[in-house]
Image: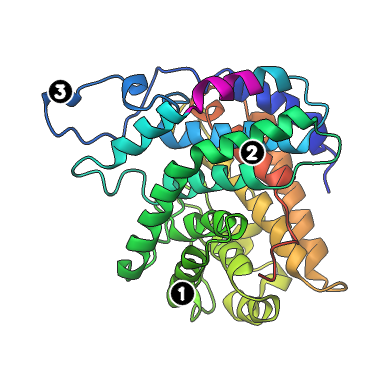
Amino acid sequence: MHRFQAGDAVDHFVAVVLAHVGREYPNKLDHVMNGPGEVRSPRELHPIFYGSFDWHSCVHGYWLLVRALRTQPSLAQAAEVVGLIDGSVTPENVAREAEYLKQPLRGTFERPYGWGWLLKLAAELGEPVAAGVRAEVAEALGKWRRILDPLAEAFCARFVAYLPKATYPVRVGTHQNTAFAVAIADDYARVARNEELAAALRARARSWYLDDRNYPAWEPDGIDFLSPCLIEAECMRRLLGKGEFLAWFDGFVPEIGKSRPATLFKPAFVSDRTDGQITHLDGLNLSRAWCWRTIASALPEGDRRRELFLEAARVHLDAALPHVTGDYMGEHWLATFAMLALTEPGAEDAAR
């Protein structure tokens, strides 16, 4: 779909992530301290996910490494990636990450963005491996999935407890966005065949979004890395049946075939990539590309909007891919969203 094919980029993305998942500082902690004994370093608090500037970026850095191992049989850094994950994803370290969650006043730790990414990582470990992936790599993926399972189940339980009381959605284009978290958590519900989680996600998504019509798309905000409009559509693509999704989508953005709202088709301008929040807009361009492509996959053959959406994906990728690296404020996380835009499956889960 794009002249810069995924296979050309994955080795580069992996090299970027390998350089930062073990980089402890600088670090932005989400840490409630219940006493002076809890003034501790990131590595002490989180023996696996202490790098990449913050916990959630480290989690989705690991997701990128796992996706590369699972889907790229000729990955140049495969041995290095296996060694890194083998040394960090251990039963002892997973138990410490899970124990952190049990302490007082940590019920909202990384809610909902980090919750969704941890479950997406666990789901990735359970997906089928590509043809040609070595048997020892496939075995390692299965081993890590089993080891990580207690932490995945802890976050699954948090979703199941939280969703029934989450009366209102959060529609911002940043970490608090509920549609994004629900969409990627659904990967885990599917792979783990967790019907309790799947039902909770579907029920809340329908409650939050099913009646939405004529979305105004007042975006982007200056710190968005998600399109509130497109990520809601992507969430509903995953959680509604295909026919129901198409009817809903027609009412949600009725003039999308006329390239309206126009703001969705124009890549965001990034004025300062050393500013950790302004550079979110590079992520917006990448996540829009991902959503445009996956939503296009749900449209019927012959629907003229398919090519319109795929062209919008190409335009947004062209705007963002050159800037995945350059400054650590973007570099510690943008490769993940580039990987989503270039490799995220689009059709197989459209009609769950």
Query: What kind of residue is marked 3?
Result: Gly
Q: Is residue 52 magenta?
A: no
Sequence-wise, which precedes: disc 3 or disc 1? 3
Circles 3, 1 touching at the beta carbon (< 8 Å): no
**Counting other residues with Cα less than 10 Å from the Cα at mark 2, is it few (<14), some (14-19), or many (20 or more)?**
some
Q: How many labels does the image show?
A: 3
**Counting other residues with Cα less than 10 Å from the Cα at mark 3, is it few (<14), some (14-19), or many (20 or more)?**
few
Q: Position of residue 17 (x, y in %)?
A: 59, 25
The numbered disc on residue 37 is: 3
Q: Is residue 49 left or right of residue 144?
A: left
Front: mark 2 or 1? 2
Magenta stretch: give its range: 82-90
The numbered disc on residue 301 is: none
Magenta stretch prevailing secondary structure: helix
The foreground one among 83 and 121 is 83
Q: What element carries label 2?
A: helix
The numbered disc on residue 203 is: 1
Disc 2 to disc 1, C-alpha distance:
30 Å
- The residue sitting at 57% across, 17% down in the picture is 19
Q: In this view, does 259 lie above or below 133?
A: below
Query: What kind of residue is marked 1?
Result: Ala
Residue position marked by numbered label 2 in the rendering: 142
Disc 3 to disc 1, C-alpha distance:
41 Å
Q: Where is residue 10 in the image (x, y as percent from the top left)?
A: 74, 30
Front: mark 3 or 2? 2
